[in-house]
Image: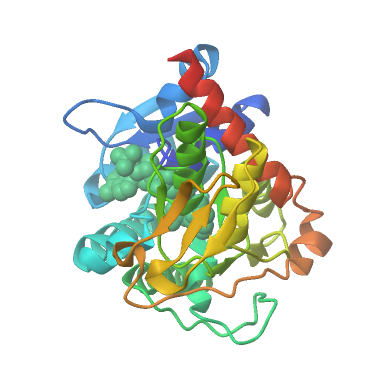
Amino acid sequence: MKAVITGISGQDGYFLSKLLLSKGYEVHGVLRRNSSMTNGTVAHLPEDIRKQIIIHYGDITDGNFLSNLLGKERPEEIYHLAAQSFVGYSFQNALSTYDANIGGTLNVCNAIKDYSPDTRMYFAATSELFGQPKEKPQNENTPFLPRSPYAVSKLAGLWTVRTYRDAYKLYMTNGILFNHESEVRGPEFVTRKISLGVANIYRGSGMPIMLGNLDAKKDWGYAEDYVRGMWLMMQQDYPDDFVLGTGEQHTVREFAEEAFRVIGINITWKGSGVNEVGLSDDGKTMVKVSRDFYRPLESDNYMADYSKAKNKLGWEPRVKFRELVKLMVESDIKRMNNE
Ligand code: NAP
């Protein structure tokens, strides 16, 4: 079996390439060049895994590149993970987010339709499509009410995939994935910001962690579980759309408390709004709130109903909240100690 992964240098590309190689796949990854030639999470892969991946340098906004790639390789599967994936940044640069997330996805769909119609496609949709949902938990039938340029772009991607699937009878599937994190999560995402901040404090930095809305409610799982779900979606007789999540809801505040607990610090909160701080028992400021990290529109209250994936794919998350926080903090401490 041959698979192409766009976004191989991201968090999910890291776990998915490991999974597919362990299943005996020939793995091809799309990587875009940056000026320092750093390869994102690909650099974190063990040497024996890294050297098995066949890299194609290119950008998903380049339709010719994708058409040539698909026409030449004709993979059985393509996992389209590449995206501008940071919600906050999408408010600052909506157009570049649309270019990558809408234009890039359309390019992948067209390349499959015109050059490799037997290729099965996975598209990385998101719980952000639900916006600020009133009903809880959310599943495949919950209305989409996006509240960020990122979410709008992913909604366009999801509907492009549905349209191509129906119009051209292609195997294209949408994974509506709730937040998933890991030890290789990008440092700008709140969970990793916390785990890195806690590891720094453990090493004696004394720098408080700066956060935005402490009461944002999310459903956080472990990325390794979610790439297993992506693969399962691609092995079904018919393409479909599936929600993956944990069914648990936690706030940013709880994530921070749990992360400090890993290093033996108990957090007490004082004040409110942007003046709220998280203090250790000896009165040191561990967390501060900054207006800079609030979004123009909040999107939260997420909690997944993943019963369709459980019933049809036999999928369930294995790593739960406390274990996830612990593994992220411990990994960052370990990485800093090895420096
Ligand atoms: P990520 O770590 O931000 O990785 C995104 C990847 O896309 C990176 O490899 C990035 O390359 C690549 N990319 C961005 N623009 C590109 C372009 N124009 N051409 C080629 N490559 C490009 O994201 P992730 O957490 O692995 O998530 C994977 C996918 O799932 C994304 O589409 C994301 O939106 C979606 N998703 C994620 C979550 C989550 O909680 N993680 C939840 C729901 C959906 P560079 O390294 O060069 O930047």
Of 242 and 184, nearer the camera is: 184
Q: Quadrant of residue 262?
A: top right
**Residue at the location (23% across, 47% down)?**
64
Q: Quadrant of the C terminus?
A: top left
Q: Quadrant of the N terminus?
A: top right
Query: Farthest residue in the left direction?
Result: 35
Q: Position of residue 243 (x, y in %)?
A: 65, 65
Q: Position of residue 104 (x, y in %)?
A: 31, 56
Height in image: 249 above or below 327? below
**In this image, 218 relative to 153: left or right?**
right
**In this image, 219 relative to 51: left or right?**
right
Height in image: 20 above or below 245? above
Query: Farthest residue in the front direction?
Result: 282
| Visible residue check, residue 70 | no
Q: Position of residue 149 (x, y in %)?
A: 32, 71
Of 176 and 187, nearer the camera is: 187
Height in image: 71 above or below 165? above
**Residue at the location (63% across, 62% down)?**
219
**Residue at the location (60% across, 47% down)?**
281
